[in-house]
């Protein structure tokens, strides 16, 4: 099957337009870094880089229990709360 694209959710502050990872407290890292451009160059397919909770909310709305809902609330609580 043909690869149609790659979606990457990272635990970081992300600029989804430029696909840059700006900084990440969980990873103890600061950037920015052109993460999406690096991946896109290697795989030669469309790439989307976004914050991991945004990716999880999108997946829930597209494939999960919220599929087809007009609106939803997605909340994630982790060790940083």
Image: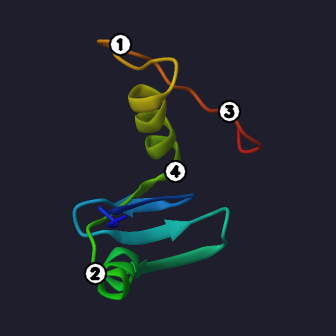
Give the quadrant of the C terminus.
top right
What residue is at 49 percent from the left and 69 percent from the top? 23
Gap between marks 2 and 1 measured at Cα: 33 Å
Circle 1 or circle 3, nearest the eye: 1
Precedes in sequence: disc 1 or disc 3? 1
Q: Determine which quarter of the picture holds residue 21.
A: bottom left
CB atoms of marks 1 and 3 within 8 Å? no
Circle 3 or circle 4, nearest the eye: 4
Q: Residue furthest front?
A: 1
Of 75 and 80, the residue lying toward us = 75
Precedes in sequence: disc 3 or disc 4? 4
Precedes in sequence: disc 2 or disc 4? 2
Q: Which residue is mark 4?
A: 52
Tag 4, which secondary structure?
helix
Precedes in sequence: disc 3 or disc 2? 2
Gap between marks 1 and 3 measured at Cα: 22 Å
Q: Which residue is mark 3?
A: 77
* Label 3 crowd (10 A; few <14 / some 14-19 / many >=20): few
Residue 8 is situated, as x and y percent measured from the top left of the image, at 45, 61
Of 74 and 59, the residue lying toward us = 59
Relative vertical location of residue 66 with respect to residue 28 in this rendering, above or below:
above
Gap between marks 4 and 1 measured at Cα: 21 Å
């Amino acid at each position: 099957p043909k690869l149609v694209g790659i979606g990457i959710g990272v635990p970081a502050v992300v600029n989804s337009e430029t696909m840059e990872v700006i900084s990440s407290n969980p990873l103890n890292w600061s950037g920015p870094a052109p993460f999406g451009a690096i991946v896109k160059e290697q795989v030669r397919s469309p790439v989307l880089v976004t914050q991991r909770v945004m990716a999880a909310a999108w997946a829930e709305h597209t494939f999960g229990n919220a599929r087809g809902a007009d609106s939803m609330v997605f909340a994630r609580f982790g060790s940083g709360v």
